[in-house]
Amino acid sequence: MSEQTGLRIGLLGYGYWGPHLLRNFSNLGCEVIVGDPSADSRQRLKENRPDIVSYASLDEVLTAGIDAVVICTPAKTHFALAKQAIEAGKHVLVEKPITTNSAEARELVGLAADAGLQLMVGHTFVYTPAVRKIREIVASGELGDIRYATSTRVNLGPVRHDVGALWDLAPHDFSILSHVLGERPTTVSGRARSFLQPGLDDVAFLNLEFGSGAVAQLNVSWLDAKKIRQMVFVGSKKMLIYDDLSADSKVVLCDKGVDVPGYSESYGDFKLSYRYGEETPQVLEDTEPLRNEAEQFLLSIRDGAASPSTGKHGAEVVAMLEAAMKAVETEQTVPVDYMGARLGR
């Protein structure tokens, strides 16, 4: 690995995310080599970035003297590509979800740990300035004990044909909630419906329970009249609103709540106190989430720096998704089985 030019990165996939990842890793001083089996994608790369070398296969990329592999290909290909890269001794950053099932995710986590390699997952929302600020506020105790959280992630489209809305959208909420709250859900229940494509849900409503006693409710859909990306965290002291679509006030701290009086002798003495305090927009750092993610990957490789989206975290999110799918299929409350997802880093 060259100290002058930075790490050599093999970027697999030049579709939607590929150009953005290429730009960020290049701007961070890395030499990027692209691999994509599509001749059209390689031609587009040649037109946009004629300075970048490209290959049609991972085998060719692995022999180009790279230090790490970044995978932004369809989810069904993640496991095989990541496994091949790890077995070749390369650090790996893979787009979410890490794999399409827990068994494969745990296998990748174990392989990376045994080889002493970094395995990171592209849960990009945990690298946004907004979510970083929310985690900071929650950890400070300013909200008090978290009582519940709600999340609405809906829009009219885009409809996917490989996975349903739950697998497409809920990973964002699962990763944000577990990162912000510092704990994972223990059970999931909910309902989902498929209106457009048999077997692929268009809308899902999920209920999560956490060991601390906190609960969360999620609504994900690509069949809604209006685009909404909003989360609310209600604590025993204050509340917080996160509106990802807001141009100037993405995170607002609300000094609002209901105070319960101490013991009283009679019903007449028992009066709830409603607090309507200030709503304070939070100042956020001005950074690009994908750049933050790329920087974290490079830091993890160079210094072993802890990441908020390790392979372990990615495997846990897949376990949450599997439990959610079972819950909506059976319409029962399902415990989240993390099993060996604790392995490694």
Image: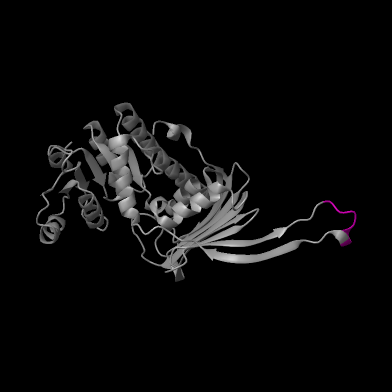
Which quarter of the rendering shows the C terminus? top left
Task: Identify the residue at horizontal 77%, vertical 61% (top origin).
Answer: 272
- 144 or 36: nearer the viewer: 144
Which quarter of the rendering shows the N terminus? top left
Task: Identify the residue at horizontal 33%, vertical 49% (top origin).
Answer: 293
The residue at the far bottom in this view is: 225
Task: Identify the residue at horizontal 41%, vertical 40% (top origin).
Answer: 315
**Which percent across, then down, holds residue 149?**
57, 55
The residue at the far right in this view is: 265
Left-right relation of 247 to 80: right
- Quadrant in the picture for residue 279: bottom right
**Residue 311 makes an appearance in the image:** yes
**Magenta highlight on residue 122:** no
**How many marks on residues?**
0
The residue at the far top in this view is: 114
Left-right relation of 89 to 312: left
**Residue 166 makes an appearance in the image:** no
**Which percent across, then down, holds residue 234?**
60, 56
- 16 or 75: nearer the viewer: 16
Q: Looking at the image, is 219 positioned above or below residue 81?
A: below
Task: Identify the residue at horizontal 26%, vertical 46% (top origin).
Answer: 71
- 315 or 122: nearer the viewer: 122
- Span highlighted in magenta in the image: 263-268
**Magenta highlight on residue 266:** yes
Q: Main secondary structure of the magenta part?
A: loop
Left-right relation of 51 to 18: left
The structure's colour scheme is one colour
**Which percent across, then down, holds residue 309?**
39, 44
